[in-house]
Amino acid sequence: MLPSLKVLQYNGLPILEQLRLEEALLRTDSYNYCIINQSSPPAIVMGISGKAERMVHMDLLCAKNIPLIKRFSGGGTVFTDENTVFITFIMQADTLPLSPYPEHVMKWSGDFYTRALSLPEFRLHENDYIIGSKKCGGNAQYFCKGRWLHHSSFLWDYDPMNMLLLQHPPKMPNYRHNRPHHEFLSSLKKYFPQKIDFIQSVLSELQKVFNLDLDSGKEDFSNILQREHRKATVLLNEMELV
């Protein structure tokens, strides 16, 4: 019997709200979830240990009035907007036949998306999803007792001008070879003309692995958000940046 998975599909959910929902579902719930969100408003999202002054050109950010968010998980800094597709798995640790450790979950995700997208040059490399030698998606993970989370941001398309908001990170994957963003990134639009084409490819593969509840996106999660739990996702624009 296939394990059960609730699929939550959103269109235009701000990434700050998505991250807060993910954190609540991870810490206070016991179901398995896949969250798929497209057409979110622009934002910059940093990992929990990210330093704004080292990751972002703050003068440009302030001029554009774009939210700067620190998420509860690790990983790097990304610019996201309506051309980003977010996909997050929140799972009980014993759901899948794999050990709940970062390298095992990462490999599972790479194998899953390789099957789902069926692109000859697509693969997981140094914790990024790449096509050829260019990045088309990034990942971050979080593990707690009996539960894990793996979230990804896919570049269906991107505006190179928006990438100027980001500094060269202090740590870069080896395959980047210090390339600027416009030479390092690749969009999925040339392979999937519409975002829904990309999403449908993922849903089709999900149906082979899980017993899907596709109506769960209609649920009201306000009660879960109000449960007592650690809340590490913050909007930095409302705080003093230190």
Image (cartoon, grey):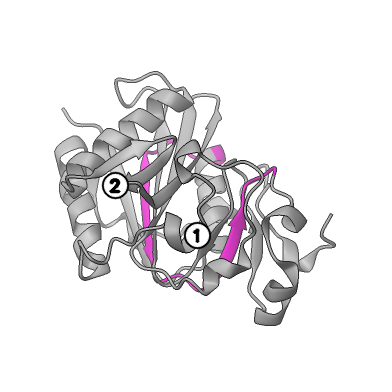
For this rendering, which residue is in front, 185 or 63? Answer: 185
Local crowd size for mark 1, using a 10 Å CA cut-off: few (<14), some (14–19), many (≥20):
some
Q: How many marks?
A: 2
Rendered image quadrant of residue 153:
bottom left
Task: Please state the horizontal and vertical placement of residue 67, each as a whole percent of the image.
Answer: 64, 69
Name above or below for residue 156 compared with residue 107. Answer: below
Q: Residue at x 50, y 59 (%)?
A: 181
Residue labelled with disc 1: 181
For the record, the magenta segment spans 27-49
Residue labelled with disc 2: 132
Task: Please state the horizontal and vertical placement of residue 211, each as a whole percent of the image.
Answer: 20, 40
Task: Please state the horizontal and vertical placement of residue 156, each as a whole percent of the image.
Answer: 33, 64
Mark with earlier residue (2, 1): 2
Q: CA distance from mark 2 to mark 1?
A: 15 Å
Q: Please tell me whether residue 30 belongs to the stretch shown in magenta.
A: yes
Q: Considering the numbered disc 1 on the image, is that residue within a helix, a strand or a loop? A: helix
